[in-house]
Image (cartoon, rainbow, N blue to C red):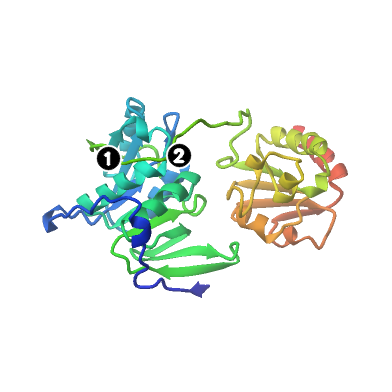
Amino acid sequence: MIALATPARISLRGAARMHTTPLRSFSASSISRNTLLFIEHKEGNINPASLVALTAAGKIGKEVHGIVVGKQGETDGVVEKATKVSGLSKVLHASGDKYASNLPEPLAPLLQELVSSKGYTHLIAGHTAVGRDVLPRAAALLDSSQVSDIVAVHSEDTFERPIYAGNAIAKVKTSDKIKVITVRGTAFDKAALEGGSAQAEAVDAKDAESPTTFLGEKINQSSRPDLATAPRVVSGGRALKSAENFEKYIEPLADALNAAVGASRAAVDAGYADNALQVGQTGKIIAPELYVAVGISGAIQHLAGMKDSKTIVAINKDEEAPIFQIADLGLVADLYNAVPELLEKVKK
């Protein structure tokens, strides 16, 4: 373990001037000294990464309040679900068309205003694409140094986060008045969706200029489980040699196991699989119950994305492949012979 400490203060005033909204003053009686959790949602469902972040927030030792934002009329169901989540004591919510696409320009000033006016000491979110986009801007407005991708909570100001592609863990202590944190989505258990009884409270939408316009998104539709949350994953590497072989060997095995399909960066770069399937430091970081690595050597960048899996099975003809160092079960064999045999046995 590497013990590090952040500077007493890293000034982000230059970045904060992107918005001119002043911090609102508040009296001592209005200070909540609690944690504000940004709750992501899509199609009426709470993002699992937000539930993981809630568990981490609970370890800080203060009350956790959530904030739900979205397009007018689309947040009601999410707010109702959030009030039932175990660990939340209050659910704030704001609606407006500008919040429909999770753009950081309107969201960050809202978070800054809530943290400042209500006296929250911690602002926390999942380390997702949205979290990585919104929270740094909010941290700049709050003049705080963000602590990103934490995997452990020691106290209200001390956390652990992986560095060097997960090969070392840094213990970070921040002296910022307001702690802005993102949480790795595999580091903690998800908070339960039932058992809570939080109060809902509407807050005013924040006016903020946004030079960015959301045009649309392209979503890959699949009948298979989602890679980010699937309990079982079958991944293929460069040894598949072609997109046709990837489809022939990896996908049937994944279907037989009711698993999601993943891929190494080498396979993605070679065009064997879509980049949405990439597992690793520059792809998705996952921790399924079962991870089957087929034809993957085990570069550190790939291991950073899956080494927390509960059970790792590796199939590779190179007995010196690094993947075997972390695998629970390893098979030294040619995948073109081993995978069809394994598939036949799984079907039986």
Q: Is residue 213 above or below residue 147?
A: above
Q: Is residue 182 left or right of residue 330?
A: left
Separation of disc 1 and disc 2 at Cα? Answer: 23 Å
- Residue bearing mark 2: 47
Residue at x 63% of width, y 40% of height:
276
The spot of residue 130 in percent (x, y) is 46, 44
Q: Residue at x 48, y 59 (%)?
A: 151
Disc 2 crowd, CA 10 A, few/some/many (<14, 14-19, 20+): some
Residue for point 38% across, 48% down: 54
> For the residue marked with disc 2, what is the amino acid?
Asn
* Mark closer to the chain start, 1 or 2: 2
- Do the numbered discs 1 and 2 sit on residues whose CB atoms are within 8 Å? no
Quadrant in the rendering for residue 252 = top right
Disc 1, SS: loop
Residue placed under numbered mark 1 in the picture: 206
Q: Quadrant of residue 254?
A: top right
Mark 2 secondary-structure assignment? loop
In the drawing, does residue 298 fall left or right of residue 163?
Answer: right
Res. 57 in view:
yes
Image quadrant assignment for residue 338: top right
* Mark 1 or 2, closer to the camera: 1
Q: Position of residue 279 (x, y in %)?
A: 64, 48
Mark sitting on residue 22: none
Amino acid at dot 1:
Lys
Q: Can see residue 59?
A: no
Q: Position of residue 36 (x, y in %)?
A: 31, 49
Q: Residues within 10 Å of mark 1 (few under 14, many from 20)?
A: many
At a point 60% along the width and 40% down the height, the residue shown is: 227
Task: From the top left corner, tell me how far across and down residue 118 is, in percent.
Answer: 21, 50
